[in-house]
Amino acid sequence: MSSNAQLLALAQALLPNYRQPPTVMVRGEGCRIWDADGREFLDFSGGIAVLSVGHSHPKLARAIAEQAATLMHTSNLFFTEKELRLAAALVERTGFSRVYFANSGTEANEALIKLGRRWHHEHGDGARTELVSTLHSFHGRTMGAVTLTGQPKYHVGMGPMLPGVQHIAYGDLEAMERAVTERTAAVFLEPIQAEGGIIVATDAYLRGVRDICDRKGALLFFDEVQTGYGRTGKFLAREWSGVMPDACSLAKGIGGGFPLAAVVCTEKLADGLPVGSHGSTFGGNSLACAAGLAILSIFDEEKLVENAHVVGGHLGGQLEAMAADAELPAAVEARGRGLLRGLKVAPSHDAAAVLARLRDLGVLASTAGGDVIRLAPPLNVTAADCDRAVAALREAFRTTPPKA
Ligand code: PLP
């Protein structure tokens, strides 16, 4: 078995587009992960909200292995059993009536951009091509999705961006009223801006945006790539507000680590992507959909959406207590819902330094919005593991020195 140091010598072969600590992960089980030196970590990064059923869930691993030995791929030249079964299951669980499969969140959002524009085209209003998105949003890295992403740092040196996209303040209904016009194809919103810093939209805002879109004839799309799949304690975060968008993008937790994504939409949009208008070689392949079906059956067996609600509430309460604790001045605000949680770091401290200290203490997490420590553990995490993570987080906030 190679050590961290031996393996890191190979890192030269990678483009340096990620910031990664000098540790090499080799094995995971449940909420735990081990590096090549045998060091154990509690994984509250959750693969950035991907590990819905934890690392190496035996039922998921078995489903993937069995499907790989049965039928892996046919392309979309043919229906396959697992694709049809997963589509039907998603329709049943989400209340939407049609599904398109992709491989990643950014691809699901690209499909939504095309579905939004093409639907208007099919309905005689091809002038509706503009898209409205929000500042601090994150929708992915491909050119359409990165244009939607309301964070200029992701656009640097990548231009020109897609024309016809505007970004307005999240939570501002008056700005939305002004931005949506007779040229708007669709509005894109995250019910919680996750990468932007775990900013939870109010129900009134989401209802207000739905009303604006209805009055002005624009479509409303929710990006539930990070908030969907039980993460917030409901199957979709949209359920908290009761607002039904015209479509949602789903990814991350849907495959539990296997690349899979989906667009789910209402019957109204069923004719939005006619034959040949869009597609993906791998999208919805049998192997990915077998993983997706296994995830749903684990969700039911282990009651993971309920667990995200209950254990997430417990975690949220502890983060609130940290933010209120006068002995932890660097922890200033707790945010989030279910098992998508954030703790804002005071300007006096560097969130990356708190994160590194937390890792030294044996707990993995990630940052969001630059100054928020994000916790997005597997949905089958226990309250006891949350208590362990919070104890380490307290220690990290207490012992990380202020910025120089
Ligand atoms: N949309 C949201 C809300 C996300 O959080 C992300 C990824 O973090 C994406 C889209 C992009 O997903 P992917 O990295 O799978 O392309």
Image (tube, rainbow, N blue to C red):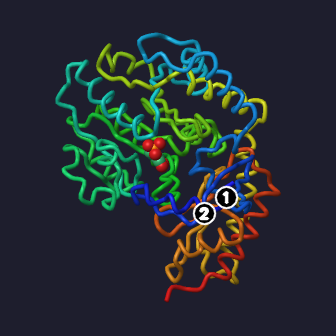
Q: Residues within 10 Å of mark 1 (few under 14, many from 20)?
A: some
Q: Residue furthest right?
A: 384
Residue 354: tell me if it is visible.
yes
Q: Position of residue 78 (x, y in %)?
A: 45, 10
| Residue marked by disc 2 | 23
Q: Residue furthest bottom?
A: 404
Q: Are marks 1 and 2 in contact (CB under 8 Å)?
A: yes
Disc 2 secondary structure class: loop
Secondary element type, mark 1? loop
- Give me the C-alpha separation between circle 1 and circle 2: 7 Å
- The quadrant in which residue 388 appears is bottom right
Tell me the amino acid under the disc marked 2.
Thr
Quarter holding residue 85: top right
> In the image, is the residue at mark 1 within 8 Å of ligand 1 by its beta carbon?
no
The residue nearer to you, when weighing 392 against 288, is 288
In the image, what residue occupies the spot 51% across and 24% down? 96
Q: What residue is shown at x 28% (from left), y 41% (from top)?
A: 131
The answer to whether mark 2 is within 8 Å of ligand 1 is no
Left or right side of 330 for 325: right
Inspect the image, locate mark 1, and give the three-letter code of the amino acid beneath it: Ala
Horizontal side, residue 102 vs residue 147: left or right: right
What residue is shown with label 1? 36
Q: Is residue 148 above or below residue 14?
A: above
Is tag 1's residue or tag 2's residue first in the polypeptide sequence? 2
Position of residue 266 measured from the top left corner of the image (x, y, whole percent): 45, 23
